[in-house]
Amino acid sequence: MKDKIFGVLQRVGRSFMLPIAILPVAGLLLGIGSSFTNATTIETYGLQAVLGDGTILNALLTIMSRAGNIIFDNLPIIFAVGVAIGMAKKEKEVAALAAMISFFVMNATISGMLTVQGEILSDGTIAEDVLSGTIVSVCGIQTLQMGVFGGIIVGLGVAALHNKFYKIQLPNALSFFGGSRFVPIISTLTYVGVGILMYFIWPVVQNGIYALGGLVTGTGYLGTLIFGIIKRALIPFGLHHVFYLPFWQTAVGGTMEVAGQIVEGGQNIFFAQLADPSTVHFSADATRYFSGEFIFMIFGLPGAALAMYRCAKPEKKKQAGGLLLSAALACMLTGITEPLEFSFLFVAPILFVVQVILAGAAYMIAHILNIAVGLTFSGGLLDLFLFGILQGNEKTSWLRIIPVGIIYFILYYVIFSVLIRKMNLKTPGREDDDAETKLYTKADYKAKQGAAAGGEAAGASGDEKSALITQGLGGKKNISDVDCCATRLRCTVVKPELVNEGILKATSPSGIIRKGQGIQIIYGPSVSVIKSNLEDYLETAPNEEYIPEAQDETASSVQSGNGANGTDGPAAGTSDVNAAEKSGAMKVKKVLCAPVAGEAAPITEASDEAFAGKMMGDGYIVRPEQGMTYAPEDAEVSFVFPSKHAVGLRSTDGTEYLIHIGVDTVNLNGEGFEAFVKDGDQVKKGDKLIGFDIKYIKEHAKSDECIIVFTSLQEGEEIRLRKPGNVSALDETAEIVSF
């Protein structure tokens, strides 16, 4: 259970990194834009002619500032989408869409509740008795101030729904909405409920957050020390993002009124003050969650790198020096500490303990000295220049970082040197002679953890159907594309001769159609789930061709859906019916009326091989003379395809059938069609269903024939054409017979 929770938290931490990754760019735009449009800065350096109001540079910098600020203003929805993408296992684009929709739905629901309860008045203003700052505008919606927490709630919830339902199989009548299409639907419904709950729950949660923030800020410098130690200690586990994010982005890190607005979170407060020209000195209480990083990232850890270099063996010094120099420069310039931290964590954990204590103390020292330098991602020279030096020492007290940093450089160098030599630690350059000199990474650390725990079982997927499909298609190397429509798995192969229909038939398809390199395997409405499973399997399957020792000649020569002699034509069916009629064993169960006027013919004459082979069920066709389909009986509309080329009906006696207008008309995307019904409608015999333009379909599709397929026939039942040739709409044309 503990391992499972740890694994989930790791994934949550990783999912935060996608939205966090945009912050450096946003901070860069806002930092440069705000710095060089600040009237005081321009006047101090005498730059009115270049950067003053009305200049081209001033306009450009103003735009940069606005572009950066919009990202910070909309972090909740950015986190909603980013976290959903990060936590979704597959088909991440669906999770992203569902998260965005759910975010709007949740906040619109909360806004509705606020309006109903009288907290938002009919003219859009906020009632006088509402606590200031608790209702804000989010993407133009007046809602509760949930900040980034609101986005995280949406992102995590939608990801959970997505991972649970993206392979769901619905009943045939609703199969179009199965699989990944179901995710936005269930997410929307869920977040209407979540929005209602949040209206009642969030004020209580918010009070708790304020109390927690007050506890953290109320402990002063000690609280800063504890924060710093915990954050650095979580680095090896990848959980530090989960820990520090609330302090940076929510009320846990404090609240402050800036330019008349209540701002929550240390980082948000800093950037709000950065954009406010009236700021005299940035708040050290807000920046205490990151200002100390400049001390140990620019000065401390490079001192540790120098110590490891000086302690390296003479014959390995040059190699170790090159590696340590590049790692130290990365740490100083960008604040990326992983190459250095993970190296001594891996080979000498005692050094990491020292690093955690010294780094934690750096946060506290910066707080004590009123250093208030902001950052976007990490404490390197680039952020120090933008948010410290450029802003001026009066606002940031950045000059105090230098003497403290020099002391930290000496501390790291001395402590690391003593411990490495005294304990003979195997830091880079001190390895055994047969060991490689290298910097370790987080992957190495995780590999070591896995080895200590006995490793992870990396078994292949137990998806036997996907394995058979892969083999039948000639192996992963032979598959160049996988897709599906409503009923067919559509695959493109490199070498058609490697396709083995005998193996594919073992997966129980309704039929197989081969057209050159295109292979269509008909599974019915559950095909979207089969496609998802196949894509999952192909990710880990060996990239090789599969050539069976003995090809099944019968399977290769007989098209699926045909009889043993390669035919399933009307002659065979007719002889069976005649024999049954003579013996009195045949029974007419139901008489069927034509939904459209035209020429009726057996389904075996359909232009589409799948329909003609009865792979989706028995039925008949009508070559239309009029462009209108009617309900052939009283029924319920099970579904109307979005492209309007097909409608599913369920009669009052339970008969289910599909009226499919034209062949390959799904590609017309609704052009030439007009639907008069929608899903769930109750229709009477003779009601209009779908109108269609016969001329347009003939010009743009393979055929205009209407195919009526019965999908609920039982064993021993089939469709017999009662009136072939010309029929009018609603004429008795066919019948269901049983034997």
Image (tube, rainbow, N blue to C red):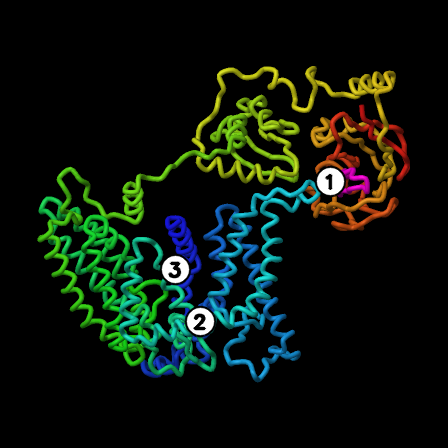
Residue 208's label in the rendered image is 2
Label whose residue precedes the other's in the sequence (3 or 2):
2
Q: Secondary structure at mark 3?
A: helix
Residue stretch rendered in magenta on the structure: 646-660
Task: Name the residue: 16% across, 51% down.
Answer: 321
Nearest the viewer among 696 and 520 is: 520
* Quarter of image, res 451: top left
- Vertically, is 650 above or below 403? above
Label whose residue precedes the other's in the sequence (1 or 3):
3
Nearest the viewer among 161 and 438 is: 161
Q: Is residue 36 left or right of residue 109?
A: left
Task: Name the residue: 55% across, 80% down.
Answer: 130
Residue 286's label in the rendered image is none
- The amino acid pointed to by label 3 is Val
| Residue 607 in view here | no
Task: Name the residue: 68% across, 45% down.
Answer: 174
